[in-house]
Amino acid sequence: MAYNLKGRSFLTLLDYTPREIAFLINLACQLKIEKSTGTFNKNLQGKNIALLFEKASTRTRCAFTVAAIDEGAHAEYLGKNDIQLGKKESVKDTARVLGRMFDGIQFRGFAHETVEILAQYAGVPVWNGLTDTYHPTQVLADFMTILEEFGYLEGISLTYVGDGRNNVANSLMIGSAKMGMDYRVVSPSSLFPDDKLVALCREIADGTGADITVTDDITKGVSGTDVIYTDVWASMGEESKIAERIALLKTYQVNKSMFEKTGNPDAIFLHCLPCFHNLETDTSRSLPDICEATDDVFESGFSRVFDEAENRVHTIKAVMVATLGK
Ligand code: CP
Ligand code: NVA
């Protein structure tokens, strides 16, 4: 079934119904097949797309760029030092100017309020490519990867281990609640998700059959799970907290012995990337002593992280086509 999402912004999964989320994931699967056969319908022909980045990005930037070009649009990268935003010009004025020139705007940055103001004043669809609070396009790719692996989402157990209140964890909890999944967040209590967001997700879960568990107990959190997911221990903007986070999270490292605790031979590993994992062998960068995942998981046969990364392009394309396409 097709849903009319034309003109809608995509700021958080809270704004989308379970059916609309399923529609976007299914559209992404269809666009993936079309790309593999070289069929491009140029759904965004003649459109201009602004890509605003206050923070660094590999996957999100490249996914928006490639998806736009595949569909016939022009994508313009506007980095934090390239435009007046945050210096001479307010977010509200920037939104009104870009909205007169571009047909759609991607924003990645710090305050979630910035993307909300952009969406309020631009008059064109605005897509959230990550804020401090949410990372919704990431979760579409994650769920597409889970769907490809297991064939369904409802009832799938997804355990997020690590910083339980970062942007990725928040969006996974919302998405899991919407899609009737069994979401478990495993972290020290000081990194539990915000109580209000947990309460809201439990309210959504009451209507979808989802379960939301928040625990500091690794064995309880991973037992029988289908997916173990982790992310960096300090997100962009939290660089000064790295030492503190290592101390808090070192026993929450995702490694082979944690996977054995699932008791599920079919469990898979997901990570939004970028990931610190091969500390012993990687001498090319300055790296922490201990990190969120080990190579016996990251490089294993049950790791799906590069399928997940590829799926960013198909899901982001689906969001742009659904909200802006012909
Ligand atoms: N997962 C993700 O958003 O990656 P980038 O930071 O490289 O965009
Ligand atoms: N939580 C991470 C996600 C990066 C894709 C961050 O915000 O840096």
Image: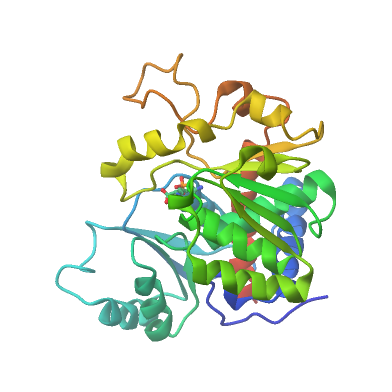
Residue drawn at (74%, 74%), measured in percent from left and top? Answer: 206
Q: Is residue 250 left or right of residue 66?
A: left
Q: Residue at x 62, y 69 (%)?
A: 201
Identity of the residue drawn at 47% across and 57% down: 167
Which of the two residues, 22 or 249, is positioned nearer the viewer here? 249
Residue 324 visible in the shown view: no
Give the percent coordinates (x, y) of residue 222: 69, 40
**What colouring does the structure picture have?**
rainbow
**Camera-side residue of 45 and 152:** 152
Quarter-wise, where is residue 242 in the image? top left
The residue sitting at the left extreme is 88
Q: Quadrant of residue 288?
A: top left
Q: Position of residue 1 (x, y in %)?
A: 83, 75
Q: Quick check: 277 left or right of 155?
A: left
Q: Is residue 66 left or right of residue 141?
A: left
Image coords of residue 4 (percent x, y): 70, 82
Residue 303 drawn above or below residue 196: above
Residue 322 is situated, as x and y percent measured from the top left of the image, at 65, 72
Regarding residue 91, the answer to whether it shows in the image is: yes
